Image (spheres, rainbow, N blue to C red):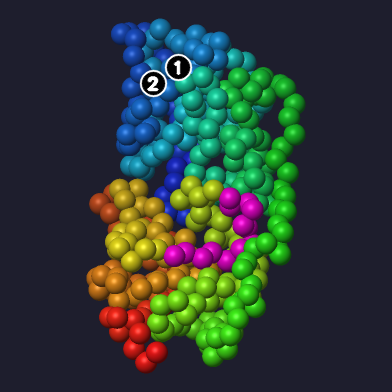
Amino acid sequence: MSLAVLKSRAQLGIEAPLVCIEVHLSNGLPGLSIVGLPEAAVKESKDRVRSAIINSGFNFPNKRITINLAPADLPKSSGRFDLPIALGILYASGQVNIDENIDEYEFAGELSLSGELRKISSAIPMAIKCVEENKKLIVPTQNNKEIGLVESVKAYGFDSLNEVVEFLSGTKKEPIKPKVEIDFAKLYQDLEDVKGQYQAKRALEIAAAGGHNILLVGPPGTGKTMLASRLNSILPPLDKREALSSAMIASIKGESGIAESFYKRPFRHPHHISSGVSLVGGGSNPMPGEISLAHNGVLFLDELPEFDRKVLEVLREPLETGSVNISRARCQVEYPANFQLIAAMNPCPCGYLGS
């Protein structure tokens, strides 16, 4: 057959909308074109896919290849579509025989020039959608740990394009098993490590109990940062729903160590020269900022007066609503941002007033 259709998912906020990859081979001047509102990383996939197919022992078709990423009005970014594009070319050119029902699977993975699969971002939102729609997911092995955080997911991890082809041709493989192994004793620094500062520790206990924001004022070297970094240790533990919500945002951002810190409340500590975009998020395909990465956790602003006033103003709406809306010309996304704010500052410009 000269036409192949495979399924994958894009990233749009915390959602993972379905994308159909349609690959058509026809006679004409040899070449490969990608249509469907692809961004630069997707357009560049044509060179990665060509090299990956050749270096995996297959022939790259000497035909005119048209690849459509539908729906056309949905922005597509990153290299996650490399794997389904390569499989579509091989399937449409008749080089692989797929025994499995291809409609039951969704594919995502970036290919190296040698045909190896590389880790992708936003794997958790994809896995959640596959569970909801009862689909099977094929991803790089490097995503196994975070995929395993999603209960009831039917997913398979692979190291290369050849392994995926062998699996779809009938080779058996065990699915990724959901597993969370956390050493809770190593999750947090303990507030008991701080000696003295009984009034400040009492204030932190009250803030933790009531979910209040807090401002620490004191001279340099009195332990403000040490106290703030230990607020997490006295907050209520995350439940599974909260932990998965925070892990999903970290997955979208491409953070590492998601599985190891699954039940750990986020603690974000942006520098005082941070811009408003770095705090709330942004970009042509809007990505989460520091306040969303602190969702269900703590956002610590050290040296509060050093932050630009306009930067602090952008925190007003998220503090009131627990979410942030980012509008761009092509899309509008909403990220959760339910965090506890803790700030620290010196009492005066020299820092030693009253000491």
Q: Is residue 151 above or below residue 96?
A: below
Residue 64: x percent and y percent?
Answer: 36, 13
Residue 114 lies in the magenta-colored region: no
- Classed neighbour count for the residue bearing mark 2: other residues with Cα under 10 Å, few (<14), some (14–19), many (≥20): few
Q: Mark 1 points at which residue?
A: 51
Residue 167, by quadrant, is top right
Q: Which stretch did the figure color magenta?
A: 257-269
- Left or right of 65? Residue 310 is left
Q: Name the amino acid, label 2.
A: Asp
Image quadrant occupied by the C terminus = bottom left
Identify which residue, 172 or 224, lies in the foreground: 224
Q: What element carries label 1?
A: helix
Q: Name the residue under label 2.
A: 47
Residue 226: x percent and y percent?
Answer: 52, 73
Residue 6: x percent and y percent?
Answer: 52, 30
Q: Label 1, label 2: how many angstroms apart (C-alpha)? A: 6 Å
Which mark, residue 321? Answer: none
